[in-house]
Amino acid sequence: MPASTAPAPSAPSSTSRSGRVPRVPALLVLEDGTTFTGSSFGAVGETFGEAVFSTGMSGYQETLTDPSYHRQVVVATAPHIGNTGWNDEDDESSRIWVAGYVVRDAARVASSWRSRRSVDAELAAQGVVGMCDVDTRALTRHLRERGAMRVGISSVDTDRASLLARVQEAPQMSGAHLADEVTTPEAYVVPAWSSRSASDGSSAGGEGGRPPSGHREKRFTVAAVDLGIKSMTPYRLAERGIETHVLPATTSWAQVEALHPDGVFFSNGPGDPGATEDAVTLLRSVLEAGVPYFGICFGNQIFGRALGFGTYKLRYGHRGINQPVMDLSTRKVEVTAHNHGFAVDAPREGRTETPYGWARVSHVGLNDDVVEGLALEDEDGTLRSFSVQYHPEAAAGPHDASYLFDRFVDLMESRSTKGAPA
């Protein structure tokens, strides 16, 4: 079953992209039969996916364009959505990736000097089915108690029994291999520069961005495997003097090795890490070669699997920009941005011997003790590779964890000084 059966992007638009899209009655049905009514928001049509909630008070544009939300219907817990409209600078990829969007109060008027159109109009233009006038507080509490589950939204068929039957036929997120659906079709290069306006290479169709407006001296070369990368990530690397080669998820070790990278990066992305084998195989080759590695989110889960740990599905996941995490090496608590429904199953204490060195848990979530980071070290404790479950690129979110990009730079510098293979 397709994730969405919305009309073509031009179909719902009887207004301009900056105007308000007409509302019609809409129905939301969860796989357990729980039903919510409301109004259409964005495209008129029908969509299915996994219902999840995001607690961010801001950053809805970055959320909607994050490839990690592929095949998910996002419920916004913030009551007012769309107050600052939609601009042309904050997209994290080339399109909206959510399967659907559910809000309580959709802003009638957008107020920001950067706004170019309304969220409603952008959703409609891209054919994304949404819903407003929903009791999102009750819906969120239900998901928190019962867990993330399949959901359907329809503004064309408001018969509960009919919609429920199609929801229960929709695919589960467990076992879903989705990285190949969101990755860039071709490799592109993001050079070292300092202007994000030049760094808009994006997943699923990114062409490598416009010519840079300001170069920096190149310090390192990094091979970044795009499992659903956000455009802010190569920018964070670029502003530190790193030339980033963004590669498709299907890239082989021979293709990575041909770049002679100083480091390898695996991005965030959607789906079940337990269903992803090629990325695990590739990363094991990276670790065997001794190339420094840094992973974010899905890249953390793949790192865990490469080291021999398991992964599991969280009850309702972590999604928001306000999650407290402790760095166990510094004991510092950071407020961090999250978007994950799976986690690594690894011992919180001590170190585990692996074929590539000694692995340990480096970060933990303070709300529920979930593993939020891993480190691979030499026997003497010298760092070789690391990953985190959250989003230090802060798009959107706090900047508490931006030091991790500096840690990656320091790691590449120290390993190259020691003459480690690259």
Image (cartoon, rainbow, N blue to C red):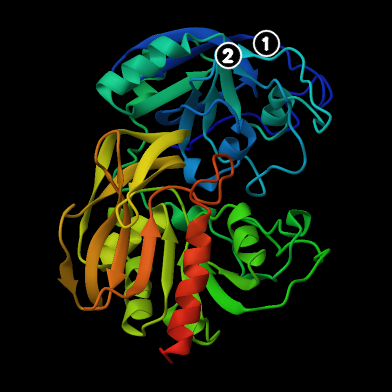
* Alpha-carbon span between mark 2 and mark 1: 9 Å
The answer to whether residue 52 is above or below residue 371 is above
- Report the side of 312 relative to 71 (left or right): left
Residue at mark 1: 23
Instruction: Give coordinates of residue 157: x percent, y percent.
Output: 51, 14
Amino acid residing under circle 1: Arg
Front one among 345 and 70: 345
Front one among 37 and 154: 37
Name the residue furthest bottom: 419
The answer to whether residue 143 is above or below residue 183 is above
The local secondary structure at tag 2 comes to strand
Instruction: Give coordinates of residue 142: x percent, y percent.
Output: 32, 16
Front one among 290 and 19: 290
Per the rendering, the mark at residue 132 is 2
Q: Residues within 10 Å of mark 2 (few under 14, many from 20)?
A: many
The answer to whether residue 87 is above or below residue 57 is below
In this orientation, does residue 250 appear?
A: no
Which residue does the image show at 60% across and 72% down from the upper left? 245
Instruction: Give coordinates of residue 271: x percent, y percent.
Output: 39, 48
In this orientation, does residue 233 appear?
A: yes
The local secondary structure at tag 1 comes to loop
In which quadrant is the N terminus drawn?
top left
> Between disc 2 and disc 1, whose residue precedes?
1
Q: Are marks 2 and 1 in contact (CB under 8 Å)?
A: yes
- Report the side of 277 relative to 217 (left or right): left
Which residue does the image show at 20% across and 60% down from the upper left? 309
